[in-house]
Image: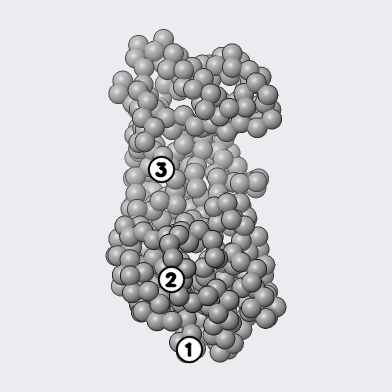
Amino acid sequence: MKFFVTCARGTEGALRRELVVRRIHAPRGATGGVSFDGTMEDGMKVCLWSRVAMRVLLEVGSFPASDADTLYAGTRAADLRRFFGSRTTLAVTATTHENPELHHSGFAALKVKDAVVDALRDRMGHRPNVDVKNPDVSLILHLRGRDARLFVDLAGQPLHRRGYRVAMADAPLKESLAAAVLALGGVPADRPFVDPMTGTGTLAIEHALASRNIAPGLRRAFGFERWSDQSHLPVFARLKKAAQDARLAKAPCPILARDISAAAIQSARRNARAAGVAEDIEFAVADVATLWPHDPPGTICMNPPYGERLPGPAPEQPLDQLYASVARTLDQMHGWSAVILCGNPLLARALRRKHEISHRLWNGPLEARLLVYRL
């Protein structure tokens, strides 16, 4: 079986290392993801354990498609019967690049849907219904030039939706990107951890989950559990049991989540409870300027405001003053490390120190820098 695991741009290296740790054979990096050849068990393992991945795609067809007719014919030739029963629902999404006849992704998705529906009606005597919001089977077409590849999404809902985000805020950091920040920043589990601008708590929660070796997919359902062929489910039950047995009882070191907003701390507490790690995190309403070092030294990890995607009235503290306050705080944290997702170059200039790592990645459409400092 051929798989392609998608991720945010800039996090491909972290994803590849994850797959190696999970004994996925020869994962190959590409822009926006990692591919590998493996078994259905491998694909389910990635769904259960990957902290950085967005989707796990199983290739079910590869064919030339220069126009609508060849796209329809190639899709219709794919045997998808193992995924569909008499009441299975379907959704199709498509991306198209450099194909003058099939440049509209919505039209390409419609042709794939028509081909699947017609083929299943002829081969099985029934046709699936379309459900774009909560389908049993999600098909994804990737078309580049004349090369078409058709995938089934094992996860269903994107993998960053762990199921614990019950309290939301403006411009939240996706769980998978937070996990990538921790991985790429080399944040250790056996040292204290502080997020002084925690927002809804995503960085602290992801650190607690990783520190306790809790599989991020334990508390959610997956698309492959709704397929017509369920012969793989006993294997998945074994994988889940092993993941449950591998959990640590508590985080090995203190985790502190602070924010100047009492409402943000309340939301972070709710999310931590939903994730099952509330007892591992100490929450406090506090300004970043009041942070003070203690022994043993650990890691400060934060995602300061960028000055973008923040609707509503302007913050009480101007951005340059906030960044200056962060810089003064870091000046006091001797012996600690700082891992910062920096979405505004003004912050890097305000810190006035040389970084050990500067790694480019994307927070949605916004380019950012992961900066690592030894203080």
**Residue 284, image x, y percentages:** 36, 79
- Marks 3 and 2: which is nearer the front? 2
Please tell me whether mark 1 or mark 3 is closer to you in this view. 1
- Please name whichever residue, 196 or 275, is drawn nearer the observer in this view of the structure: 196
- The N terminus lies in which quarter of the figure? top right
Q: Are marks 3 and 2 in contact (CB under 8 Å)?
A: no
Residue 102: % across, % down: 62, 23
Which residue does the numbered mark 1 point to in the structure image? Answer: 292
Q: Which percent across, then down, holds residue 81?
A: 42, 21
Whichever of callouts 1 and 2 sits on the residue coming sooner in the sequence is 2
* 317, 375: nearer the viewer: 317
Name the residue carrying label 2: 198
Residue 157's disc is 3
Mark 1: give few (<14), some (14-19) or many (20+) Cα within 10 Å.
Answer: few
Name the kind of residue labelled 3 in the image: Gln
In the displayed structure image, the side of residue 87 where residue 348 appears, left or right: right
Residue at the image point whose x is 34% and y is 45% from the top: 221
Query: Which residue is nearer to you in this view: 140 or 318?
Result: 318
Q: Left or right: where does residue 363 sit relative to residue 214?
A: right
Q: Which amino acid does label 1 sit on?
A: Trp
